[in-house]
């Protein structure tokens, strides 16, 4: 008995197969059925879980309009198989034959500590059902494999290859699937391609913040330069006034000039002008 009884009559018209969303396992139950065998789906170890999150991040940014990216979505591939790829992308809108969701175009499996035997069975099932491309990210070997449906085996993909598909815009670099440190740059490049309006807003905000910081720094530098010019001018005024009034400037007074603040120099000018001697305004 299918888990979803409402889906019982929804067979695929062309193949007389169960609809892909007709369940024989309960969603989120932690089990899958593969070729009639019940599989427990354990929690992922850190490397698998981290790469799973990175893959979801990349797919969300690269999914083209009209398509939906998912993780851990069950797919019924036959009467005796109902399992969930780690991630997949499928078209929006109902399937014209079943009225349910449509079949994914591309599916991903992340392989951490387990052997390739189970991902191989899943790839064979997904490919037979009509999924266009199935890929496995093998963490131990740091490589990505693609299932070759014609040869019924995995084909290694080069790190410089790009996954080009109608459901991905732009293409997804293989290197980004293997090196999580490049994820942000890859996602930003995808957003520049898919959402130039959003990128323009982010860049405009960054530019505005930069201009504000630049103006603040410029004002601060301007105040510093202006104060320095005022000190130089006041120091020169003291020297000119002393020369005119024949007030000697010995080394001690020169040192005093060099260390005096603008306010002290102005007071000194007033004092010399009033007393015709080296006396600051207000001195006795």
Image: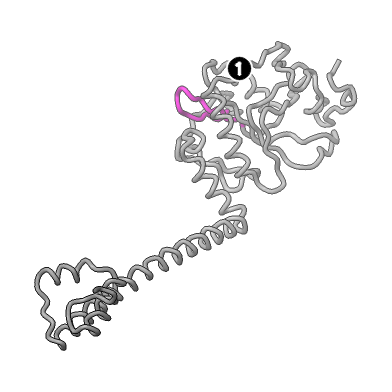
Looking at the image, the residue that sits furthest to the front is 284
Determine whether 9 is above or below 57 in the image. above
In reply to whether residue 203 is colored magenta, the answer given is no
Looking at the image, the residue that sits furthest to the top is 37
Residue 23's quadrant in the figure? top right
Report the quarter where the C terminus lies: bottom left
Which residue shows up at 18% across the image and 68% down it?
A: 256
Nearer to the camera, 183 or 15: 183
In the image, residue 86 lies at what x, y percent? 63, 27
Which residue shows up at 21% across the image and 76% down it?
A: 279
Q: How many marks?
A: 1
Horizontal side of 59 relative to 35 (left or right) equals: left
Horizontal side of 104 relative to 6 (left or right) equals: left
Determine whether 21 is above or below 281 in the image. above
In reply to whether residue 141 is colored magenta, the answer given is yes
What scheme was used to colour the molecule? one colour
Query: Which class describes the residues within 10 Å of circle 1: few (<14), some (14-19), or many (20+)?
Result: some
Determine whether 180 is above or below 65 in the image. above
In the image, residue 96 lies at what x, y percent? 83, 39
In the image, residue 214 lies at what x, y percent? 44, 64
Which residue shows up at 57% across the image and 53% down it?
A: 193
Residue 18's quadrant in the figure? top right
The span picked out in magenta is 134-147
Secondary element type, mark 1? helix
Which residue shows up at 77% across the image and 36% down it?
A: 102
The residue singled out by tag 1 in the image is: 118
């Amino acid at each position: 008995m299918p888990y979803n009884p409402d889906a019982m009559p929804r067979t695929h018209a062309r193949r007389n197969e169960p609809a892909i969303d007709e369940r024989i396992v309960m969603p989120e139950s932690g089990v899958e059925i593969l070729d009639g065998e019940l599989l427990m789906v354990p929690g992922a170890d850190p490397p698998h879980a981290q790469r799973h999150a990175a893959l979801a991040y990349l797919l969300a940014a690269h999914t083209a309009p009209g398509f939906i990216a998912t993780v851990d979505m069950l797919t019924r591939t036959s009467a005796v198989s109902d399992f969930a790829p780690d991630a997949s992308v499928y078209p929006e809108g109902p399937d014209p034959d079943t009225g349910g969701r449509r079949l994914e175009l591309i599916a991903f499996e992340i392989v951490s500590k387990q052997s390739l035997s189970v991902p191989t069975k899943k790839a064979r099932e997904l490919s037979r059902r009509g999924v266009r491309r199935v890929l496995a990210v093998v963490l131990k070997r740091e490589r990505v494999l693609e299932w070759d449906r014609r040869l019924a085996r995995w084909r290694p993909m080069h790190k410089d290859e790009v996954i080009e598909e109608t459901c991905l815009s732009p293409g997804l670099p293989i290197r980004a699937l293997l090196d999580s440190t490049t994820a942000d740059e890859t996602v930003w490049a995808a957003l520049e391609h898919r959402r130039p309006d959003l990128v323009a807003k982010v860049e405009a905000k960054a530019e505005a913040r930069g201009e504000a910081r630049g103006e603040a720094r410029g004002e601060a530098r301007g105040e510093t330069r202006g104060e320095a010019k005022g000190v130089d001018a006041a120091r020169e005024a003291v020297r000119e006034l002393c020369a005119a009034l024949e007030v000697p400037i010995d080394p001690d007074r020169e040192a005093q000039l060099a260390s005096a603040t603008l306010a002290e120099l102005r007071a000194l000018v007033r004092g010399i002008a009033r007393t015709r001697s080296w006396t600051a305004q207000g001195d006795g």
